[in-house]
Amino acid sequence: MVAAGAGLAQDASRLGKELTATGAEPGAAKDGSVPAFTGTEAPAAGWAWGKKRVDFWRHKGEKPLFTVDAGNVDKYADKLSPGQVALVKQTKGYTMDVYPSHRSCGVPDFVADNTKKNVGVAKLKDNGWGLQEAILPGFPFPMPANGAQAMWNVKMRYRGVALDYKKVITAASPRKGSDEWIKAFSEQTNYFPWGAKGSASFSKLPQVENFVYFGYTAPAALAGQALAITIYTEQPTETQYYFPGQRRVRRMPTYAYDAPQIGFENQYTLDEPYVFNGLMDRFDWKLVGKKEMIVPYNAFGAYDFSAKFEDVAGKDFIAASHRRYETHRVWVVEATVKAGMRHLAPKRTFYIDEDSWNPLVADDYDGQGKLWKVREGYSIPVYETGACDVSAFAQYNLLEGRYVFDEHAAGTGADVRWITEPGGNPRLNSNFYTAENLRSISER
């Protein structure tokens, strides 16, 4: 483990020279397991949304270098999280195919420019976790001095102005001894009001991280229910929930943090999507340092919209053929619940890609200090944005032997879509996420 970067000189001229535009070390690891940074790789000619992304990726034909399994996991334990090690050891048949590494997660020029402007400009509030100022879209703290700064880089990573899901299957695997899945089908939009191309001061923008819309279509118990969520950057999340049986919208002020999501048998909380979601105020955030680690990367298989859901999501884990791992350098951030606060997972450790600031792995511990959950975020290059992102992720409950799979495209027939221009889309407007609008578009 390399020590954290609290002593890094906050010099903007280092970006793009001795550091990459996002603050990563450009050089390779001594043993070559992590290559030198190469920058964004364009897809092969002919890609358009609706075509499989992997078919246009230049490294698509590669074979694994080695496979991690229960028989050899201890050999690689120093490059895995404790949760990953436990997952391999206790889940029969679970393996990790490790491929050659590719450091091709760059950012568009305007994001690089804004990131450089942030050096000496971006700052946290006096509370130690809230964002006070940043130039967006860009990484606020490319040379982070503490864990909260690193997490703001995760939250403000460039994802365009919206992620749109025509159909997504939010799934929880069967209980032990059962074959019955929980599958909720919905359409979703995730809108980032600060994500427009250009340059804007965070302090002059709405203090909103993102707006979210869910419209459930199946099963019958959820069909017709819909949510409009405003995730603020500092004040509590505001959730409006439409219940068709009552034909009314209810405000749900406590539907945030570690509150269980409705309908998922306590397997999935509100702050677990995308590996981490929502406010940071309940935790102290420690930047531990960097390490070389085997992480999900270029994991196109989780976005295979043409595959059958069952071929991607097995009964106990995501199929090895739809997971890809590479060795990369990651930042390690520890979150410990603050004195006087409560959370179902009082300790969490996040492993964050140094090139893209994508959250790739997270380990959660329960109140007794036992490993409880491990999340893996499936990072891919996003051809629309010119950056990499994590949308699809899996979360494994190590104590109950179940897992959640969400924000993917598997088995849906439609790819995730990253939108970079508003283009008159009514969902790319804050007025779409009001209680009044939710009622008007939901009533039948």
Image (cartoon, helix red, strand yellow):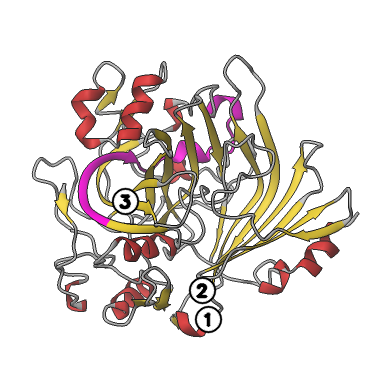
Residue 433, numbered label: none
- The earlier-in-sequence mark between 3 and 2 is 2
| Circles 1, 2 touching at the beta carbon (< 8 Å) | yes
**Considering the image in quadrants, where does the C terminus appear?**
bottom right
Read off the residue under disc 3. Answer: 334
Q: Residue at x 22, y 55 (%)?
A: 37
| Labelled pair 3, 2 in contact (Cβ < 8 Å) | no
Identify which residue is drawn at 26% across, 66% down: 144
Q: Dot 3, how many residues are within 10 Å of its Cα: few (below 14), some (14-19), or many (20+)?
A: many
Q: Mark 3 or mark 1: which comes first in sequence?
A: 1
Left or right of 217: which side holds 344?
left
> Is 72 in the magenta?
no
Residue plotted at (48% across, 37% down): 395
User: Compared with residue 95, is residue 352 higher up or lower down, i.e. above or below?
Assistant: below
Label 3 – label 2 distance at C-alpha = 27 Å
The furthest residue to the bottom: 204
Q: In this orientation, which residue lies closer to the viewer: 64 or 319?
A: 319
Dot 1 alpha-carbon crowd within 10 angstroms: few under 14, some 14 to 19, many 20 or more: few
Residue type at mark 3?
A: Glu
Residue 130 position within the rendered picture, expressed as x and y whole percent measured from the top left: 42, 71
> Which quarter of the picture shows residue 306?
top right
The three-letter code of the residue at mark 2 reads Trp
Region rendered in magenta = 287-312
Q: Name the mark nearer the viewer: 1 or 2.
A: 1
Q: Which residue reaches farthest front?
A: 340
Residue at the (25%, 37%) spot, across then down = 100
Q: Is residue 299 magenta?
A: yes
User: Which percent across, then down, holds residue 191?
Assistant: 59, 64
Q: Which residue is mark 1?
A: 205
Instruction: Decide which of 247, 116 is in the foreground and name it.
Output: 247
Residue to which mark 2 is pinned: 194
